[in-house]
Image: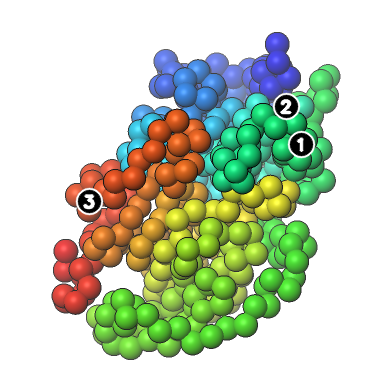
Amino acid sequence: MSPGLALTQAAIDALGFAPAEAAIGNLSWGTGRLDGRPVRVARIENRIASGSIGRAEAERLVALLRVVAAERSPLVLLLDSAGARVSEGLAALGAFRHLYRAALGAALAGAPIACVLGRNAYGGASMVAMLAHERLLSPETRLAMSGPAVIASTAGTSATDEMFLAMAEAAMSPAAREKASAANHAWQEGEDVAAWLRGALAARGDVVAGWQARHEALASRFDAAQARRPWEPMQRRDLARLFEGGMALRESDGLVEGEATRGGESLRVLGLVGPTPLGIARAWRFADLAWKALAAPPARLEVLLDCASHAPRLEDERAVQSEFVVDMALGLAALGSRGTQVGLTVLGKAGGGVYVALAAPAARVASIYGADIQVLPASAVAAILGERREVVPSFPEYRAAGVADEEIKLGLAPGNA
């Protein structure tokens, strides 16, 4: 038995977990018990497509997470997954948007969540894992936004290159993840999983304050100078048409913030724009603006997105890139929990974990006419599936898949589709 399966089985034994119904794809679920109290359990295992999460699995997980949020019941996630099922295209992305919204709701409701990881936790699966209070990693766990194949492809090297593999191991190993965060623990065979679960599922205090404290701690993982890039006034003709009542926006290294007026309403604005993939410093700065807004939550917040993907780089993965992407989602969701109406407008390119992180907390997602929303950039899809998909979908496809709720045609009255 592999180390990942051994850890998963140890957790199953500790909880006495027995699935409630027949599995759906890679997902099985049910309840267990820990010290006599019931614990809800969801398991994603590597049955098909590297344990990926498709529409069917996501829909069932949404139902479970809503129950967990309502009950504030303890939840143990057993994950061995490559993330969203890329082969399902936009349908998987739309399903993951709704799955992640439900997961954020459970996390912010105060439900104790613990995550036990098998071999893989990539992409969206790593984002789900980051909503747990603590994570238990097997000796073979690889926890990252991008897998080695995608990083190698982007860097123009081979995933089998010995030097690259050594660097990837150093960046993503359980020991490296444990060093990066006290919430990550590298399990050794024979270690008492029940004891770890007791601590991981212990009651927490102010949940939002805890997530905000984690945000502050992330600042130590990158060069602080990158968080002090200068601001410049921002002028874009498409934004002038979007915010017909006027705007006062500024930009710094692809990060946007300011105030605007649309349809007679004043809006707080945050955004990610530009051709450069999202790195951890810009993600942290975005989240920092969201968390600071929590001191006086605005009535409305419009998030702008024209950024195709996170940066699949080892240097970002060394800092546990998934935490930075999730930090943005948590900041926006915390504002939503305090009454802010959060909306997302996709101006150009969007996809993958960056899209999910900003779309999940949003009550409404709009796409500008011609916007390009993809499950992943073409290069990443090619690295995973061995094929390229270059066609830009139409808005009816976006709406059918659940990735956008309305289309905005600039130059017409706001909201016209």
Which residue does the numbered mark 2 point to in the structure image?
A: 140
The residue drawn where x is 75% and y is 59% is 221
Residue in view at x 47 percent, y 67 percent? 274
> Residue 163, labelled with which disc?
1
Question: Seen in the image, is 326 located left or right of residue 317?
Answer: left
Kindly identify which residue carries mark 3.
394
Residue at the (27%, 84%) spot, across then down: 244
Q: Does residue 311 appear in this view?
A: yes
On residue 147, the disc is: none
Badge 3 crowding class, 10 Å Cα cut-off, few under 14, some 14 to 19, many 20 or more, is few
Q: Position of residue 382 (x, y in %)?
A: 45, 36
Q: CA distance from mark 3 to mark 2?
A: 41 Å
The one nearer the camera, 13 or 401, is 401
In percent of width and height, residue 78 lies at 60, 28
Quadrant, the N terminus: top right
Outermost residue, front direction? Answer: 156
